[in-house]
Amino acid sequence: MEHKLIDGVQVPLTAQEIAQRQAETTAWNNGAFDRSIASLRSKRNSLIASSDWPVLSDSPLSAELKTAWLEYRQDLRDITEGVNTVAKVNAVVFPDKP
């Protein structure tokens, strides 16, 4: 049985409190994918933003290197395709920078 502390005394939870706790736990568990994909997208977006300079028209890089950076950025954009579970989010491997 679940308990709560009131003035240092363990008191059993009521049926309503147990139901509320279970609902909160279910809601938290149901949001696991949303939290994990949001974290993945945040990291991905940061990597894309930090790789803007190599593909700008005035970048000093060779055409070959610019193409490599463009491919890297596209790989980053595509990284969430088919990712629909927490396990798949956790298995994502980010591409290496050129």
Image (cartoon, rainbow, N blue to C red):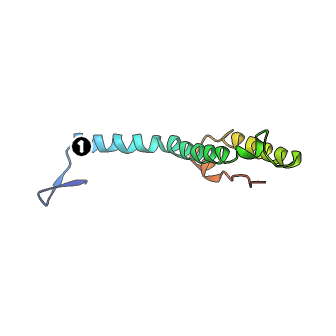
User: Is 79 displayed left or right of 42 in the figure?
Assistant: right
From the viewer's side, name the closer residue of 91 and 16. 91
x and y, in percent, of residue 97 in the image: 74, 54
Q: Secondary structure at mark 1?
A: helix
x and y, in percent, of residue 60 in the image: 81, 48
Q: Give the quadrant of the N terminus.
A: bottom left
Circle 1: residue type: Glu
Q: Residue furthest bottom?
A: 8
User: Is 90 displayed left or right of 31 in the figure?
Assistant: right
Residue shown at the point (22%, 54%) measured from the top left: 3
Q: Residues within 10 Å of mark 1 (few under 14, many from 20)?
A: some
Q: Give the quadrant of the C terminus.
A: bottom right
x and y, in percent, of residue 10 in the image: 16, 58
Looking at the rendering, which quadrant does residue 57 occupy?
top right
x and y, in percent, of residue 88 in the image: 63, 47
Q: How many marks?
A: 1
From the viewer's side, name the closer residue of 41 and 7. 41
From the viewer's side, name the closer residue of 69 and 10. 69
Q: Which residue is mark 1?
A: 17
Residue shown at the point (56%, 43%) measured from the top left: 37
Looking at the rendering, which quadrant does residue 49 occupy?
top right
User: Is 28 displayed left or right of 74 in the figure?
Assistant: left
User: Is 97 displayed left or right of 49 in the figure?
Assistant: right
